[in-house]
C-alpha cells in the first residue's frame, strides 16, 4: 500500500480501513461542488435537503440534543451514523470539511512526500514533490522514513504515517514543524521540516520508449479532467494510451466524466440514483474514439475512478488490465448540522452503462495482471493495432 501526505485519515471516522483515505467518500464532494445537479460550490452549501429525510433527521436531532446538553455534537452525530448502518456515512467538523474541499481543489498542507510500506514493514519514500519542503531538505526517492515527531513508523499502515506527516491529531497547519528520522544506506539523520500549502500533482504524463503515452491520474481533483483531455490531444499520432488509475481513490465525479470525454464521442458514462430519483452522467462529444486505450486498475482504484473504468469498459472503449477494483459505488450527499459540522450520508448507488452495480463488487479487469501490469498493458496496446 502506498500514499502521500495529501491523503490523510479523518480524525472522526473509525469505521474500518476502507474509510482511511479522505477521497474514499468521493461522490459526496461531487454533490457539494456541483457534480450532482447542484449549482457551483459557492452556492452549494450543504443543507438538510441533501440527505434522505429520516436518516438525516436522526443525525441532526442527535447533534442538536448533544449541543443542548453541552456535549460534542460531532461525536453524537457520528454515533447516530454508526447506528444507522451507513457504511460510508461520515461526520466532519466544519474545519475538517473545509480541508476536505480544499484537497479536492488540488491543495493540501504537508511536506510533499509519497511513501509506501515494504514487505519488511519499513516505510520507503517513493516520490518527493518538486518545490516542496521535503525536496528543499534533500530527501530523495528511496530514503527510509524511520520516525515522525519521535514516533517510530516501521510496521505502521501508510495512512497512519500520512496522518503523522500532516499532523492531523494536532490540527497542524502551514508553518508548523514536523521532525523526521531518515535513513539512506548506512546513514541515519534527522530533518525538521516546516509544513506548507502545496498543490497536488493529480495528473502526470510520460512517454514510454515505444511511443506509448502513460497518463497517471492520482485523484480526480479540480481541473484533472481537462488535464487528461489535453494529454490525449498532445499524444503522438498513431500511438496508444495507458490511463493509469491504480491507487486512485476517487475525487470529483464531474472530473471523471470530463476525463471520459477525452475518449468518447458523447454518450452514457454512468447512471446513479438519489433517494430513488434516477439520473445519468454523459460524456461530452468530440473525444478521441480510435486511439488504442488500456485502463490500468488495482484494489486501490475506487469510486469515481471505478465509475470511469466501468464506463470505458462497457462502452468497449478500453481494455481494462490489472486487478479487481475496490468496489465503492455508493453516493453520499452532505447535510449541515446545527453546529456547522457536516454529515455525509448515503443516498443511492451508481451503475455502469450496462447496468452493473459496483458497490461491494468492484470492476473485474479484462486481463488480470498484478506483477508487471504496465508491461502487460503495453503488450495489449501492441495487439490493438494502429488506429490510423
Image: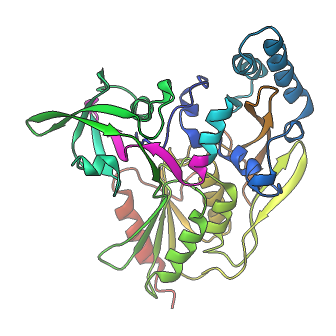
Residue 379 image point, x, y percent: 38, 70
Up/down of 385 relative to 346, above or below? below
Residue at the extreme bottom: 388
Residue 224: within the magenta? no
In the displayed structure, would residue 239 be above or below residue 308? Answer: below
Please say whether residue 115 is one of the residues in the magenta stretch: yes
Range of the magenta residues? 102-122
Residue in front for this viewpoint, 134 or 244: 134
Side of 140 relative to 82 (left or right): left
| Residue at 45% from the left image edge and 41% from the top image edge | 174
Provide residue 348's location: percent of width, then percent of height: 80, 42
Q: Nearer the viewer, residue 225 or 193?
A: 193
Outermost top residue: 69
x then y, percent, for residue 81: 75, 23
Counting from the top left corner in percent of width and height, residue 257 is at: 68, 64
Q: Residue at x 76, y 31 (%)?
A: 340
Residue shown at the point (72%, 79%) measured from the top left = 285
Amino acid at each position: 500500500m502506498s500514499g502521500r501526505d495529501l491523503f490523510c485519515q479523518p480524525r472522526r471516522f473509525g469505521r474500518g480501513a476502507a474509510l482511511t483515505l479522505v477521497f474514499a467518500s468521493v461522490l459526496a464532494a461531487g454533490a457539494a461542488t456541483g457534480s450532482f445537479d447542484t449549482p457551483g460550490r459557492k452556492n452549494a452549501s450543504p443543507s438538510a435537503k441533501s440527505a434522505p429525510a429520516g436518516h438525516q433527521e436522526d443525525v441532526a436531532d442527535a447533534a442538536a440534543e448533544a449541543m443542548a446538553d453541552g456535549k460534542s455534537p460531532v461525536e453524537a452525530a457520528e454515533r447516530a451514523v454508526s447506528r444507522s448502518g451507513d457504511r460510508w456515512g461520515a461526520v466532519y467538523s466544519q474545519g475538517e470539511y473545509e480541508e476536505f474541499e480544499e484537497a479536492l481543489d488540488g491543495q493540501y498542507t504537508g511536506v510533499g512526500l509519497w511513501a509506501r510500506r515494504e514487505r519488511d514493514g519499513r516505510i520507503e519514500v517513493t516520490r518527493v514533490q518538486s518545490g516542496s519542503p521535503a525536496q528543499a531538505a534533500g530527501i530523495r526517492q528511496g530514503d527510509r522514513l524511520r520516525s515522525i515527531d519521535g514516533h517510530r513508523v516501521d510496521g505502521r499502515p501508510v495512512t497512519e504515517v500520512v496522518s503523522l506527516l500532516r499532523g492531523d491529531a494536532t490540527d497542524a497547519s502551514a508553518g508548523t514543524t514536523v521532525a523526521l528520522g531518515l535513513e539512506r544506506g548506512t546513514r541515519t539523520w534527522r530533518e525538521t521540516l516546516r509544513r506548507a500549502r502545496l498543490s497536488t500533482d493529480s495528473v502526470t504524463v510520460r512517454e514510454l520508449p515505444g511511443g506509448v503515452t502513460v497518463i497517471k491520474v492520482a485523484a480526480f481533483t479540480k481541473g484533472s479532467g481537462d488535464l487528461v483531455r489535453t494529454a490525449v490531444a498532445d499524444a503522438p499520432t498513431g500511438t496508444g494510451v495507458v490511463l493509469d488509475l491504480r491507487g486512485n481513490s476517487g475525487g470529483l465525479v464531474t472530473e471523471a466524466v470530463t476525463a471520459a470525454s477525452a475518449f468518447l464521442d458523447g454518450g452514457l458514462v454512468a447512471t446513479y440514483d438519489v433517494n430513488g430519483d434516477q439520473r445519468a452522467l454523459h460524456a461530452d462529444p468530440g473525444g478521441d474514439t480510435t486511439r488504442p486505450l488500456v485502463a490500468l486498475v488495482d484494489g486501490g482504484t475506487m469510486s469515481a475512478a471505478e465509475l470511469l473504468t466501468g464506463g470505458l469498459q462497457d462502452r468497449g472503449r478500453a481494455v481494462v488490465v490489472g486487478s479487481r477494483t475496490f468496489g465503492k459505488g455508493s453516493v453520499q450527499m452532505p447535510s449541515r448540522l446545527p453546529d456547522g459540522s457536516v454529515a455525509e450520508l448515503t443516498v443511492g448507488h451508481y451503475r455502469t452503462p450496462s447496468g452493473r452495480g459496483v458497490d461491494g463488487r468492484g470492476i473485474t479487469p479484462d486481463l488480470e495482471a498484478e506483477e508487471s501490469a504496465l508491461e502487460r498493458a503495453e503488450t495489449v496496446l501492441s495487439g490493438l493495432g494502429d488506429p490510423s
